[in-house]
Image (cartoon, rainbow, N blue to C red):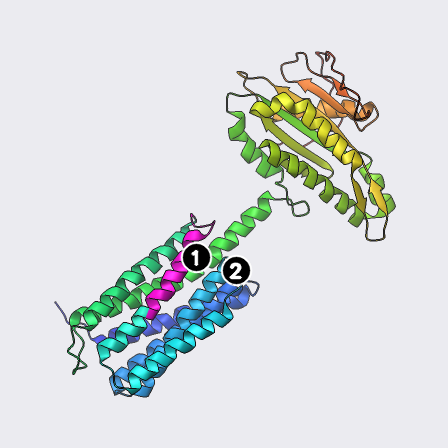
Amino acid sequence: MFDLHLPTLTLACISIFWLLTVAVLLIGWQFNQHRDIKLWGVACLLISAGTSVYNLGNSTEISGLVWLGVVAAISAQVFVWWGTQSLEKQPPWWRVGGLVFTLAVGIYSLLLVNDAPLAIRISFYCLFYAVIHLMVLRILLKSPYRARTGYRLYAGIASILLVLYGLRIQFAFDTPFNETTLSHRYIFVYYMILMAEFVKFVTFIYLCFERLEYTLCQLALQDTLTQLPNRRAFVTQTTQRLEDDTAHALLLADLDNFKSINDVYGHLAGDQVLIAFSQHLQHIAQQEGALCARTGGEEFILLLSGDSVKRVQHIALQLRRQIEACQVRTEQGHIIRFTVSVGVATHRRHQPVTINQLFECADGALYEAKARGRNRIEFALTEHQAAPSSVAPMRATTSVPCEESNTDLPKRYLTRQSLT
């Protein structure tokens, strides 16, 4: 067995703190769009400086340094709270944090000036730290991202620190009021708190990279213009849904004469048209519990499942009529009206089907809609059985015709990349 040299252990902990502080500050400087990591970087700087000054004050018995170290630590906890609010895209409560800091420093200064017992002073700032961590824990537990690993780790460290601060308060009273020598239990808890703060520093770094990874994943699975899922995300989401023993219907929608919109009004106006259409499509998808995506260019896709398949004809007609009535105003004041052609592939229950099979049938039906004059809806069945064959442009009061479809589905008119 050997005895630990506490000054050396303290110096090692403080050195690690400073190294991690530099790491967090560098990350905050590199990712300057994330205010939370900047606030945490300031918190790490204050904790490192405060711990250094506090231990120097204790070793030299200079109360001014002790006061300065505690003040730095108090301000650091406020910055940790602000950083956690910023992590959740909440505006930091600057005034509330400033008021809390001022009150805490004022009360601690009064205790120090009036020569309050060491245990009382320790209990006060430990209680302050505990309150801040409770506020942080509340934010994390209410977050919609609380299931992420980084959030769980952060919440776990905050909970551990709450327990350790409580033990630190309890063990501070091991020392009689007229003495300044701290018990071994207190010193042990103190170094445990230092280790927990060390892990909290690492958690800040982990949270930053976890969010970066999440952002990259979102970009890889989302169309940046319309904010709809892209082809890859759609295939990923539909694979499991198609395994269910239920009916499915795939709607493949293509904007009519979209190239002429770009040629006449410009590509920015074309982008406005795509965004307007995607909003209508997403609204229908949310109503029906369906999946939708932009598969490329002016082509979009919608997958219906279960009871929604029974209303597929009504849903397709609703989409076509909404787009027919839609108007897009450009920045130059032009009004753009546009239409959409839709190919629908339906699939009955108890029959295995793949996304490519549905897409093949819907694509053939879409070709028919384009060939028969556009602004139409064409239907096909993957089992090559009876299905509504077409819905031509008509007035809202006219009933939708249904007729028997040909068993020979039209061939695809374009060579497309496989969805899978």
Residue drawn where x is 62% and y is 21% of the image: 310
Residue 294 visible here: no
Residue drawn where x is 55% and y is 51% of the image: 215
Return the disc, 1 or 2, that comes first in the chain's sequence: 2
Estimate the spatial distance between the alpha carbons at disc 1 and disc 2, rounded to whole Å: 10 Å
Q: Is residue 144 magenta?
A: yes
The residue that label 2 is drawn on is 90
Residue drawn where x is 78% and y is 39% of the image: 326
Which image quarter is the N terminus in?
bottom left
Label 1 close to label 2 by CB (< 8 Å)? yes
The residue that label 1 is drawn on is 139
Q: Is residue 347 above or below residue 331?
A: above
- Relative placement, left or right, of 100 versus 184 is right
Q: Which residues are magenta?
A: 128-147
Residue projecting furthest to the left: 1
Residue 341 visible here: yes
